[in-house]
Image (cartoon, helix red, strand yellow):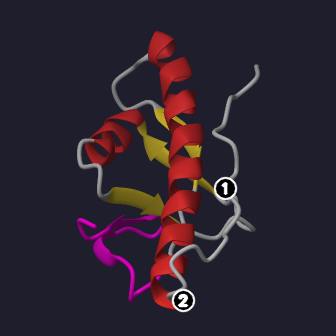
Amino acid sequence: MQLLLPARIEPRGVTGCPIIDRLKRVEQNEELFRALNEQIEDRVHIFKDDGMKIIVVCECGDLNRADRISITLETYEAVRANKHDFLLRPGHQIPDVEEVVYRSPDYFIVRKPDV
């Protein structure tokens, strides 16, 4: 099975503002992981079962991490319902960029501000 990911966008510092450039890099990284998880979700729908667990990757802003998260398909879809919500492993959140809105032992749901 081949997963198609968007091309990685290298940070370039286009605005000249380190804070804005950092936020953009984090956003691009999270979107990359989200795209991967959405492809995983698309493939498991043919086996959909209530309570079924799927393995997705942490959607944190660090491209050097690709930690796995086991989550029910139903919960994953609930997180996807808000485009500002992302699934992260505990400890991967960036407090000045996102707010933790739900904590479990295995994953956090973080919310990004509308930018």
Element on which disc 2 rests: helix
Label disc, if present, on residue 18 of the rendered structure: 2
**Residue 36 on the magenta segment:** no
**Badge 1 is on which residue?**
9
Residue drawn at x 46%, y 64% is 107
- The amino acid marked with disc number 2 is Pro
Per the rendering, the mark at residue 68 is none
- Range shown magenta: 92-115
- Is residue 108 one of those drawn in magenta? yes
Q: Tell me, yes or no, if residue 77 can be seen here.
A: yes
Labels 1 and 2 touching (C-beta < 8 A): no
Residue 98, horizontal then vertical, whole percent:
35, 77
> How many badges with numbers are in the image?
2
Is the magenta region chiefly helix, strand or loop? Answer: loop
Cα separation, mark 1 vs mark 2, equals 17 Å
For this rendering, which residue is in front, 13 or 32? 13
Amino acid at the residue labelled 1: Ile
Categorize mark 2 by other alpha carbons within 10 Å: few (<14), some (14-19), many (20+): few
Position of residue 19 in the picture relative to residue 50 (left or right): right
Mark 1, other Cα within 10 Å: few <14 / some 14–19 / many ≥20 = few
User: What residue do we see at 49% from left, 69% from top?
Assistant: 24
Q: Quadrant of the C terminus?
A: bottom left
Looking at the image, residue 53 sits to the left or right of residue 101; the answer is: right
